[in-house]
């Protein structure tokens, strides 16, 4: 049976998007999802996202990494899904949807999507890195030679090494440009390579920089390989709340196979 596929990208993090409100997609076929994400034998993407109906809110998000497995929250994917929902006429300029980490509020104006992320009450600070979960697990460490750094080789060592092991973590390398701006390059679990942007990663870096006093600002700009993201947040009694991931999300392609 023919299926219509869309591709969206959010600051270079790209996704195959499917309108699955009729529940026609085989959600348990890992090999098929991985093939659709394959950049040679398939459409090619960092992940695949289903838009599904929900009884109480605008829609439901189901996220798969490029390896074909369902995974934790995808911030850029959530932003792209809001743009996709608007294009389908499911929403106008704001949305509430359910994802694996709970309900998310979002607004869209032109190409810019603002996505509320989960609250974060725990930031683990270590000698050479920070670890926190912004809907997905993130290891954050400084790397001043970030431009020449071998993200895939060094990122995979950390992702598969102790304490993350097989379950793994995403790995973010950071360089401070000024008190409001940081460069980030991310090795993504489940893609098992560097992606041009990682939304939950950018969010993790912004909160981590504040938590270790590298910034006192509450609106941080993250320069990523695929563009620029902003993260805004409040801190109250040790809880990072009202966390918003802001950036562009664009339609790349619509096709049927
Ligand atoms: N690869 C991540 C999920 C996608 C995160 C990323 N694409 C984002 O924008 O947050 C993981 O398995 O934890």
Image (cartoon, grey):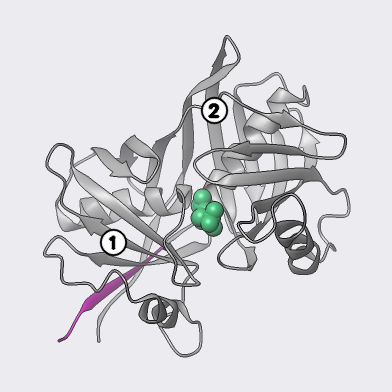
Span colored in magenta: 1-8
Going 73% across and 64% down the picture, which residue do you hit?
Answer: 156
Which residue is disc 2 drawn over?
A: 120
Q: Position of residue 215 (x, y in %)?
A: 73, 24
Question: In the rendered image of this protein, does residue 122 appear above or below residue 189?
Answer: above
Quadrant of the rendered image containing residue 211: top right
Quadrant of the rendered image containing residue 98: top left
In depth, the one of 220 and 33 nearer the eye is 33
In depth, the one of 164 and 38 nearer the eye is 164
Disc number placed over residue 50 in the picture, else none: 1
- Image quadrant in which the C terminus is located: bottom left
Going 58% across and 55% down the picture, which residue do you hit?
Answer: 197
Question: In the rendered image of this protein, does residue 254 appear above or below residue 245?
Answer: below
Q: Position of residue 61 (x, y in %)?
A: 30, 52
Query: Could one spot residue 37 in this view of the protein?
Result: yes
Q: Position of residue 242 (x, y in %)?
A: 45, 23
Question: In the rendered image of this protein, does residue 74 appear above or below residue 219?
Answer: below
Going 76% across and 63% down the picture, which residue do you hit?
Answer: 151
Q: In the image, is 102 to the left or to the right of 147?
A: left
Measure the alpha-carbon separation of dots 2 and 1.
26 Å
Q: Secondary structure at mark 1?
A: strand
Crowd tier of the residue under label 2, counting other residues whose Cα lies within 10 Å: few below 14, some 14–19, many 20 or above: some
């Amino acid at each position: 049976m023919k299926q219509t596929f869309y591709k969206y990208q959010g600051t270079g993090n790209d996704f195959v998007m499917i309108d699955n409100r009729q529940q026609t997609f085989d959600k348990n076929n890992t090999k098929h999802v991985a093939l659709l994400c394959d950049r040679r034998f398939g459409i090619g993407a960092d992940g695949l996202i289903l838009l599904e109906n929900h009884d109480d809110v605008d829609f439901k998000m189901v996220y798969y990494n490029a390896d074909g497995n369902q995974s934790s929250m995808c911030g850029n994917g959530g932003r792209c899904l809001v743009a996709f929902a608007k294009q389908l006429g499911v929403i106008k300029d704001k949305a509430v949807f359910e994802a694996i980490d709970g309900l998310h509020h979002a607004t869209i104006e032109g190409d810019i999507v603002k996505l509320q992320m989960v609250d974060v009450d725990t930031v683990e600070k270590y000698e050479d890195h920070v670890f926190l979960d912004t809907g997905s697990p993130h290891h954050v460490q400084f790397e001043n030679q970030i431009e020449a750094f071998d993200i895939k080789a060094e990122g995979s060592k950390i992702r598969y090494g102790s304490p993350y092991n097989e379950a793994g973590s995403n790995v973010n390398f950071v360089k401070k440009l000024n008190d409001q701006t940081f460069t980030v390059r991310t090795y993504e679990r489940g893609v098992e390579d560097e992606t041009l942007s990682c939304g939950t990663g950018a969010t993790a870096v912004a909160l981590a920089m504040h938590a270790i006093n590298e910034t006192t600002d509450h609106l941080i700009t993250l320069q990523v390989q695929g563009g620029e993201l902003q993260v805004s947040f409040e801190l109250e009694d040790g809880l990072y709340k009202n966390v918003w991931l802001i950036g562009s999300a664009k339609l790349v392609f619509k096709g049927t196979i």
